[in-house]
Each structure stands twice: as structure tokens, then as C-alpha cells.
Amino acid sequence: MIGLGAGRAEGIVAVGAHCDDIASGAGGTLLTLCRARPGVRVDALVLSGGGGEREQEERAALAAFCPAADLRLTVLKLPDGRMPAHWEEVKAAVEELRGRTEPDLVLAPRTDDAHQDHRGLAKLMTTAFRDHLVLRYEIVKWDGDLGRPSAYQPLTPEVAEEKVRLLQEHYPSQRHRPWYDREAFLGLARIRGIECHARYAEAFDVTKLTLNLGG
């Protein structure tokens, strides 16, 4: 297992199809990065949930997951489960995000995620952010679509526990879901930790990675 740093991340883009996607898939990574880089800019885009309870949950949650960050969050009102039918609106939102950001790191869904909303957003990120480090997070759910990730961010036990606490605290609308509990989140983090010789970790797919080993 070889550890490679991505340099000093001054700007992060994080996107999700639904409120809680970003926090579920990469909340521990955001906590780790934002604590290490006070003042880091985080541009977050969520495609659905705008204007209601879900947006309120998301704003409070991402503020907690991005402590001391310059957080800029946009929550749209596209219909959950119907985003392939709203392709032009999704594409326009991603292009607008790209036009106003030049991030060092992009956090996005996986291109082979079983949920059509996640998958569609993931494919757009590939074309919009061509020359960036894009880490594609995983979300545990009933589909059973977890794969074999290629990149890992180790989490301290304290960060792993805080991620679970914040998820439970800030997304009461999701507590009824069978996969939305402490055992599921910590269990997946423990498995990914084993795979990278850590106690806990979040795991990501990397489609392309440009190296600068002689720089």
C-alpha cells in the first residue's frame, strides 16, 4: 500500500444528487480536510431537496462536516429519482459550478452506482472536471452495489465516530431507512480501514490520476 499526497488542497468541490449523499459518502474526509486546512473553500452542489426540510438538514449538516471552511452550498429542487429526465438542468448546474471554481479536489458519486441519479451526476463530472483529482465516494444502501475501491482516506476513530454522530444528528428524515444506522456506517468504515491498514477509512474510485513523481 503506497500513500500519495494530493498537495495542499485550497479548494474542494463536493457534489451529491440528494441531501446526505456527500456526508454519507465523504463526511469523514471532509472533516479531516477542513480541520487540517482552516479556511479551505468548499463549493457544494446538491441537485434535490431545495426549499424544504431536506435543504435545512443539508445546510446544518455540511456546516458541521466542514468546520472553519468557506462553505458555499447550492441546493436545487430537481425531483428525486427523476434526474435522467432533467438532464439539461443537471448539466447546466454542473457547468455553472465548473465555471466559478478551480478546485484541487472533487468529491463525487461513483459512475457505477446503482442509483440512476447518482450515476447520471457522476458521468457529468467526468466531462466537466477533466483535469482535476476526482474521488468518487460510495454510499451503502440496499442495492448491494459496493465495489472494489482504488483509493482510501484513513479516518481516526474520533473522526469516524463524529461522522456517525453528525449523520444521526442532522438527518432525522433518514433515520427510518434500514441502512441508515451506526452499525452500517462504522461497519463499512472498518472494512475499508482493514483494506488500507487503518482502523477506519472512507474509500473512493479514481477514474484517472496524473502523477508528478519527478516534480
Image (tube, grey):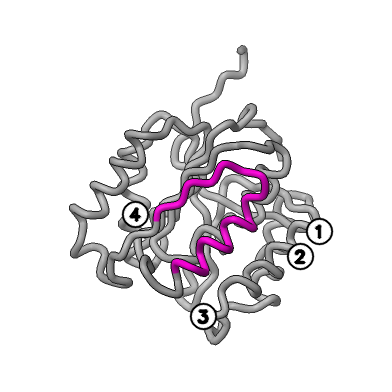
Which residue has dot 3 on it?
Answer: 173
Q: Residue 121: give its label.
A: 4
Q: Secondary structure at mark 4?
A: helix
First-in-chain label (1 vs 4) = 4
First-in-chain label (2 vs 3) = 2
- Counting from the top left corner in percent of width and height, residue 209 is at 50, 32
Which residue has dot 2 on it?
Answer: 161
Q: CA distance from mark 1 to mark 3?
A: 25 Å
| Viewer-nearest residue: 12 or 70 | 70
Q: CA distance from mark 1 to mark 4?
A: 31 Å
Q: Amino acid at mark 1?
A: Glu
Magenta stretch encompasses residue 134: no
Q: Nearer the viewer, mark 2 or mark 3?
A: 3
Which residue is at a point 32% across and 65% down the rendered structure image? 116
Q: Amino acid at mark 2?
A: Glu
Is residue 35 visible in the rendered structure shown here? yes
State whether residue 119 is above or below residue 151: below
- Counting from the top left corner in percent of width and height, residue 200 is at 75, 58
